[in-house]
Image (cartoon, grey):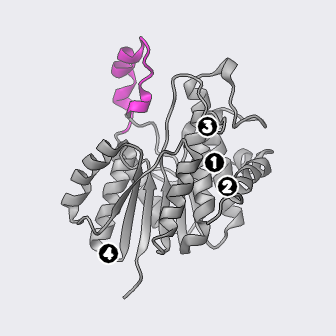
Amino acid sequence: MREKELLIVTGATGGLGKAISMYFASLAVEDRTLYPILCCRNKDKADDLREYVEPLGLSRSDYEIFLTDLSSTTSVNELALRIKSLHMPIRVLVNNAGSMFGSYQTNAEGIEMSMAVNFYSSARLTEMLTVDMAPEGSIINVVSLVRKYTDIDSDFLKGYPNSYTRINHYAKSKLALSIFTAHMAERYPNLYINAVDPGVMNTKMLKMDRWYDRLADYLFRPFTLQPYQSLGAVMAACENTDGVSGCVFTKSKYFPMENKIKNHPLKHLILATICNSVELVTY
């Protein structure tokens, strides 16, 4: 019998994350050698998630939910070590977790929170788990269209408290993750490493807590995608029928990562930031 392989998703209880969790559950029902690991922060939401995945045919022994706080480096380390302790190769890792913050905040290490959750933790977790990937396994990072409309400098981890806006810092974090994705695809030719641009989804992150939220509900939200509509991009990246790497998948196509991102002047600094911190962890 073939050994079990892991399907891992972070941000498992959000809109797209829940859709991915149900997709992984369906795959595991069809192929009992697949073992989903659904990672999220909130215990109550984790309990609710069980009500979605178990009716698809999973029992409690067929998958696990791991609680983790991706704003915390310590929590990310613990998550990686817990995954490693299963001694199962990883077939697919989807770094889906993402947040926007209404005001400038930093985590315990002084990293701006959007950057900590959306980039640093995802990149750190990925780098720690590369040795545990199955042959030709897939790493999929969920990015955003806004990666194209911003830039970062050498202070990108700290952020910019005097000019903070939630959308711009979110965009910077997704740009950093995109740069890391492109560079990682070059470094690991034996793996499939791609990004997913799910489009603008109708999720709670679109709520700005401003007077124009109600106006946006009428003028903007009707044209956004429901999470299940964006799931197709993730599914296409997981199936990856053409065996591509270093690409961005949308719900209708895929294309190589943009050259200005692939060749960004800070790509080596971004890599060093992650790899140097990972080297300090004792497995």
Residue 221 shown in magenta: yes
Indicate whether 62 appears above or below 69: below
- The image position of residue 54, as x and y in percent, is 22, 59
- The answer to whether the residues at label 4 and label 1 have Cβ atoms under 8 Å apart is no
Which mark, by number, is residue 108? 3
Q: Which secondary structure lies at badge 4?
A: loop
Q: Residues within 10 Å of mark 4 (few under 14, many from 20)?
A: few
Which residue: 65% across, 36% down?
A: 111
| Earlier sequence position, callout 4 versus callout 1 | 4
Q: Please name the amino acid that badge 4 sits on.
A: Asp
Q: Please name the amino acid that badge 3 sits on.
A: Ala
- The image position of residue 224, as x and y in percent, is 39, 33
Q: Spatial distance from mark 3 to mark 2, Cα to Cα?
A: 28 Å
Q: Spatial distance from mark 1 to mark 2, Cα to Cα?
A: 6 Å
Q: Quadrant of residue 35?
A: bottom left
Q: Spatial distance from mark 4 to mark 3, Cα to Cα?
A: 41 Å
Which residue: 46% across, 49% down?
A: 68
User: Which stretch is magenta?
Assistant: 204-225
Answer with left or right where residue 240 lies relative to residue 201: right
From the image, tell me which residue sits under label 1. 178
Nearer mark to the viewer, of 2 and 4: 4
- The image position of residue 23, as x and y in percent, is 33, 59
From the image, tell me which residue sits under label 2. 182
Nearer mark to the viewer, of 1 and 3: 3
- Furthest residue to the left? 55
Residue 277 shown in magenta: no
Q: Please name the amino acid that badge 2 sits on.
A: Ala
From the image, tell me which residue sits under label 4. 31
Which mark, by number, is residue 32? none
Q: Is residue 225 visible?
A: yes
